[in-house]
Image (cartoon, rainbow, N blue to C red):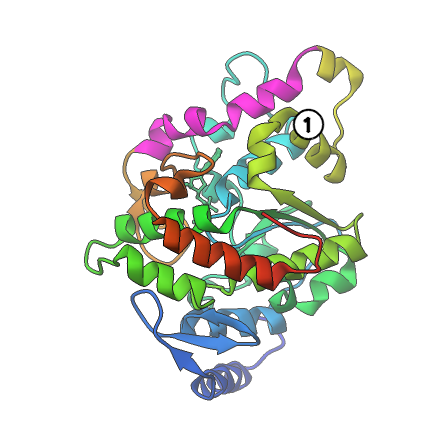
Amino acid sequence: MDPTQTKSSVDNAAEERERLVSTLPIREGFWKPYVLYRGFWVSPQVAKSVMLLQDEFKPRADDIILAACPKSGTTWLKALAFTLVNRSRHAVAGDADGHPLLVNSPHDLVPFIEKPDRELYPVAELEALASPRLLATHMPFTLLPASISAVGSRVVYISREPKDVLVSLWHYLNSVSKDHFIKLEKAFELFSEGGSYFGPVWDHYLGYWKQSIAEPDRVLFLKYEEMMADPVKHVKTLAEFLGVPFTVDEVDAGAVEQVVDLCSFQKLKNLPVNSSGTSNLAGWMPMEKSSYFRNGTVGDWANHLTQEMAYKLDTIVQEKLKGSGLAF
Ligand code: PAP
């Protein structure tokens, strides 16, 4: 909260957000209904959080925003970006002894900007972070506070093949809440109608894709599958984009491979901090930390979706992305 704001102006703003949300189109969502806020389906709480951020978030020019549609590789990107920008302070050589990633979840090291109930977690907690801040979001580009573009904060977006996103999301939802089992057919229906959390997924992708073409120095668009196929190449690209390119000496000493190994799925998944216990990592409910590390592969959709489902979703996605230059 801005210290110049009075209690009543804060209450009035909260009431106005409440009122706005009550006017939005509503549909069935995962667990609870979703509202359509400026083209994207979210829970009413998240819609209010996004509105509040638009008013109160104070970006800095040197902020780095890590963005992704849910289940597209956020955790991996957080680990990589944190490791890259902090490698002069936290060495990755050898066993990376004492490295924060060995004892913290990537989600603890890079906080999400939006939270389902931002009113309970004041934006001031983000202001307390030292520059340059690494922040994450699942918000689509058009819902980011406009001030982020105005000050020129850099944005890294990770996208993923939509069928794998769907399968990952379905597993995740059922692993974090045993009370609301969701059938794959239901998850498929919502996802392919564009009604999943922060969906439609194709519009989420397109927002960042188009911006990465318009502003390549400010918005980097990555694909999970390409990173998995050649992590060394993409980690170098990421380091350059983040303004911390590898030196020749670092490359010769194997530093790129060390970053890749430290942030690899197998390495992170097996750490006690990521494999046991619960935590409220994304600020919406306590959940098993292991739910962020399932199998981390490309093409797992084939083990779950029928050919008919795959064909249907592929057709929708191809149609939605047609002419954009983006394909999966
Ligand atoms: P979030 O949206 O809840 O933050 P996010 O990290 O984007 O989740 O996606 C989780 C997926 O990334 C999981 O995919 P899966 O269900 O298909 O297995 C998770 O396993 C995968 N993942 C997590 N960490 C890594 C990593 N270091 N390398 C590759 N994939 C990873």
Q: Is residue 241 left or right of residue 284?
A: right
Q: Residue at x 76, y 29 (%)?
A: 245
From the viewer's side, name the closer residue of 32 and 100. 32
Q: Give the magenta part as a residue range.
A: 253-275
Crowd band around label 1 with a 10 angstrom C-alpha radius: few (<14), some (14–19), many (20+): few
> Toward which corner of the image does residue 32 lie, by quadrant?
bottom left
Q: Residue at x 72, y 59 (%)?
A: 210
**Residue at disc 1, CB closer than 8 Å to ligand 1:** no
From the viewer's side, name the closer residue of 14 and 189. 189
Position of residue 159 measured from the top left corner of the image (x, y, whole percent): 57, 48
Q: Residue at x 78, y 21 (%)?
A: 247
> Toward which corner of the image does residue 189 lie, by quadrant?
bottom left
Quadrant of the rendering where the N terminus is positioned: bottom right
Residue at far left of view: 179
Q: Is residue 98 visible?
A: yes
Q: Is residue 321 left or right of residue 147?
A: left
Q: Is residue 82 visible?
A: no
Q: Residue at x 44, y 77 (%)?
A: 35
Per the image, the residue denoted by label 1 is: 233
> Toward which corner of the image does residue 141 lie, by quadrant?
bottom right
Image: 19 above or below 78: below
Kind of residue at badge 1: Lys
Q: Quadrant of ligand 1?
A: top left
Predominant secondary structure, magenta span: helix
Asked if the magenta segment contains residue 12, the reply would be: no
Which element carries disc 1, helix, strand or loop?
helix
From the viewer's side, name the closer residue of 242 and 298. 298
Image: 196 above or below 163: below
Position of residue 319 measured from the top left corner of the image (x, y, whole percent): 59, 62
Q: Is residue 96 left or right of residue 189?
A: right
Asked if the magenta segment contains residue 266, the reply would be: yes
Position of residue 238 measured from the top left corner of the image (x, y, whole percent): 69, 36
